[in-house]
Amino acid sequence: MLCPPVPWVSPSFGAYILSPTKLMRCIDGAVQHQLLLEKSPRGNLFLVMDALNQLGNCPWKVNQAILEVVISIFNDKGDEKLDVPPPPSEAPQPTRLALGGTPLTKAALKREITQCRKKAMEMFSLRMDALYKLSIAKHLGDRAFWFPHNMDFRGRTYPCPPHFNHLGNDLTRGILLFAEGKPLGPRGLDWLKIHLINLTGLKKKSALQDRLAYANEILEDVLDSADHPLTGRKWWMDADEPWQALACCMEIARATRAPDPAAYISHFPIHQDGSCNGLQHYAALGRDVIGATSVNLTPCDVPQDVYSSVAQQVELFRKRDAEQGVKIAQILDGFIGRKVVKQTVMTVVYGVTRYGGRLQIEKRLREIEGFPQEYVWEASHYLVQQVFTSLREMFSSTREIQNWLTDSARLIAKTGRTVEWVTPLGLPVIQPYHRSKTTQVNSSMQTVSLKSCFDASQKPDTVKQKNAFPPNFIHSLDSTHMMLTALHCHRRGLTFVSVHDCYWTHAITVDIMNQVCREQFVELHSQPILQQLSKFMLQKYCANLPVERRKKKAQEHHQLLQLLSTVPERGDFDLQKVKESTYFFG
């Protein structure tokens, strides 16, 4: 939008001036969420709507220097490494000869042509997507613009514009700047340098001071990247997030060359990212001392890396099995690293199954050069078991809470009702997973089958309800933490936006945002969250049931009552330590 969004004042009014937009985005066919919001007392939604209004009121502008470089590469046949899609004319052409020089068989040639055609179509699609985003950025020019926000049914916030926004890829984020500028202040330049090293993916296990020292060591490369992005040493191209790194290089160059760097007006957003945020919430819920240490809830001299810790634990299991003669453990020698287990560790907190985890590990193993591909399936099957075992030992309370949530949802769904809860900010949540319903539409020409999985008149899908409850509940907590941080940052005059568990602000206000972020996490988890959830579900699913229904399903009712009344026990972790943890968000 080219003007600030309309403030949210009800579940169906806000955001755009002319286009009707709903407060909660829903899957097509699901009406439960809107009905639940409309029945909810308006006062219960004020804090949520205020947080969305605050996020949408942040003005943005286009980084013209980065846009020019992107367009230059885009017009010069793109660069896949830099996520600038090349045109379909650069797609590989089918070859008619095998490796030995013999002609391909008819079937092999057909497969080759099909693969090349598929690749060309994918390249065209990506090229048009990039062209559309660049066209929007070019059209906006130097004008300020805004991204109105709404949320999904768990409370996670998203910009309403679907194509060009700060939730996009590295290229899109590199093009965006805050429209409002603020002086760097005494520590702003240091935060810019630390942020640059974070974007490169280097020094992840190093202390902040070591990252700052490294940034000063390579300052010559940083300035060269800023001055000659396409003709110099091109240091920025090797970063994990190259476009954001280049934008940061240019900002550092301008700041260091200013007469007074502390007075330099910066529009650049600095990111502070949660350290495996889902596990942080689980560790805080269960007051798990070992888990809290692994995900940086406790003060440490250097950041703790849970992915490396799990990889080390898996390596210990592998060595033990290799010594006992397990062949696949011997084959995996030297191939178990952080990258292999990272995705599975990250997603296990959000309900990934062993099957899904095996597929993730299989994909990582196929990417490793030198790993015997004939053992990929067996190795991924072995590794996913070891990863789950390691996590069970490292995060014991996390597994207990997950199992309690899963079992609760399973028994609730068996009674024929969907799982509902209310977030600490008062947002009502309902899971929209029902058994699929197929409707046939007959005509004189054909019969069309329409399948819906979100029809509230159908019975709940027990499997989806139980598998989705733990991740959805944790997502609702991380969105609550983000909204609380947004509201308190706004109260203190900060510019604040978020990409879920990654918080953005100006360099001068990073320290204040970090303080607010930690205070609100402690404040959130100081509430008896699981006890309140237990009380809500007991009232909703066990109280006021008709006598006939209780007698008919007495055993199920007793099981549910007993389970919901037995909240997992807490450990001895002191939540106040989070306020002193440097690497909780960083």
Image: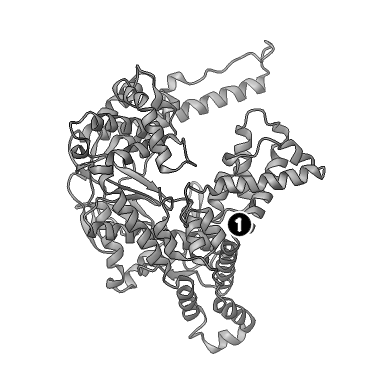
Tell me what residue is drawn at x 68 percent, y 31 percent: 371
Quadrant in the picture for the N terminus: top left
Residue drawn at point x = 61 percent, y = 25 percent:
111
Residue 197: horizontal and vertical position, in percent? 40, 36
Q: Position of residue 446 (x, y in %)?
A: 51, 47
Instruction: Tell me the residue that label 1 is attached to.
Output: 394
Nearer-the-camera pick, 139 or 324: 324
Q: Is there any visible trace of residue 403 in the rendered image?
A: yes
Q: Is residue 73 above or below residue 431?
A: above
User: Dividing the picture into quarters, in which one does residue 103 lie?
Assistant: top right
Mark 1: which secondary structure? helix
User: In the shown orientation, is residue 212 left or right of residue 560?
Assistant: left
Q: Quadrant of residue 362?
A: top right
Residue ID at (44%, 43%): 207
Q: Residue at x 43, y 59 (%)?
A: 578
- In the image shown, does 346 or 286 lie closer to the viewer? 286
How far across and down, in percent of the image, does residue 336 sit? 65, 39
* Residue 494 located left or right of residue 431: left
Q: Is residue 179 left or right of residue 289?
A: left
Q: Residue furthest right?
A: 325
- Position in image of residue 447 (x %, y %): 52, 50
Colour convention of the picture: one colour
Counting every numbered tag in the picture gives: 1
User: Residue 119 or 471: which is nearer the viewer?
Assistant: 471
Q: State left or right for residue 92 relative to residue 393.
A: left
Q: For the residue carrying disc 1, how many other residues have a C-alpha within 10 Å: few (<14), some (14-19), or many (20+)? A: many
Of 247 and 4, the residue lying toward us = 247
Residue type at numbered disc 1? Met
The residue at the far top in this view is: 101
Q: Is residue 128 visible?
A: no
- Name which quarter of the figure residue 399 lies in: bottom right
